[in-house]
Amino acid sequence: MFNFLKPKPKTARPTFAPLGIDIHCHLLPSVDDGSKSNEESIACLRIMHEAGFNKVICTPHYQYPRFPNEESDIQQRFADMKLDLASQGVSSVIPELAGVAGEYRVDTGFTDRMSTNKFLLVGGHYLLAEFSLHQQVMGLDEILFELQMKNYEVILAHPERYPYYSSSSSKLQHFKDMGIYFQINILSLQGFYGEGPRRKAYEMIEKGWVEFLGTDMHNTLYAQALIDASHDHKIIKLLDTHKFLNSQVFSANAGEATKI
Ligand SMILES: [Fe+2]
């Protein structure tokens, strides 16, 4: 009888419409630590649509030996997911599934992949790379240099989250000098990963170091946090005043990067 007192579930506002495309999410089900089913992915995608995204690029983890994904299998699963979602008639309330790529952990599997150039690239152009959250990668400069020699355009995923770069920005500055692109997680700006990453994310944006934002969406817990982020006044202002390159990710000129 007191149903009218029940708070309505909070919905997202379209804060992220200026980005248009989300370039980093784990909504291809059951291939990593992200979504477990198409239903869970749809629940997240609905909220992303409300939050202003009209396209998403799925970027499952490739990480040795935890997520030993293989590109042709990932492409097949992505095609199957698209068919299933289309058959469920949800296309008008979710962003378009615009592509599948990867979030490649720089590890021993990564260096093996480099020898065969077997990467799925974001927008067909950019190699989304991540490091371990626990320890620095040995020989990183050489690896990045070799990627650049092969004409890959590298985006470093969530540089604000690596604790070993938190106290000094000199290594991050070095990456920028090398021409590495940075992608900050939207949820870092909202405090989802704690105060350290939040502060670091804003610091890098203010320095002009950040070309891309991403949701790094894994599940509905992240989606709820995205709703909060879409109502955060500081984030709303940021999207008003800063230009990011998300919407251009399919039209970038990435030279001769090898594609599958
Ligand atoms: Fe990720």
Image (cartoon, rainbow, N blue to C red):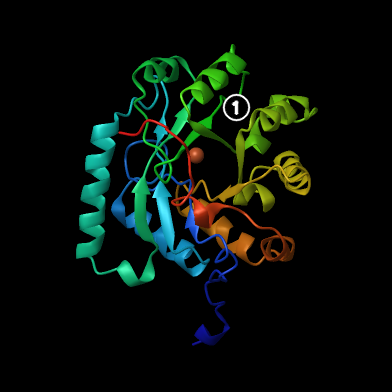
Question: Residue 142: where, in percent of width, then height?
Answer: 57, 14
Q: Which residue is mark 1?
A: 133
Question: Residue 216: where, in percent of width, then height?
Answer: 51, 46
Local packing at callout 1 (Cα closer than 10 Å; few below 14, some 14-19, many 20+) is few
What residue is shown at x 75% (from left), y 48% (from top)?
Answer: 202
What residue is shown at x 74% (from left), y 46% (from top)?
Answer: 208
Question: Residue 81: where, in percent of width, then height?
Answer: 25, 51
Q: Quadrant of the C terminus?
A: top left
Left or right relative to 193: residue 56: left
What residue is shown at x 57% (from left), y 77% (from top)?
Answer: 7
* Amino acid at circle 1: Leu
What residue is shown at x 50% (from left), y 84% (from top)?
Answer: 3
Tell me if residue 49 comes above or below residue 219 in the rendering: below
Q: Nearer the viewer, residue 53 or 209?
A: 209
Please identify the residue farthest to the top as the structure is shown: 139
Left or right relative to 205: residue 149: left
Question: Is residue 191 visible from the viewing direction of this image?
Answer: no
Question: Residue 183: where, in percent of width, then height?
Answer: 59, 43
Tell me if residue 10 comes above or below residue 166 in the rendering: below
Question: Is residue 213 visible from the viewing direction of this image?
Answer: yes
**Element at label 1:** loop
Tell me if residue 52 comes above or below residue 180 in the rendering: below
Label 1 CB-ligand 1 distance < 8 A: no
Tell how many labels.
1
- Residue 113's image quarter? top left
Tell me if residue 90 comes above or below residue 172 in the rendering: below
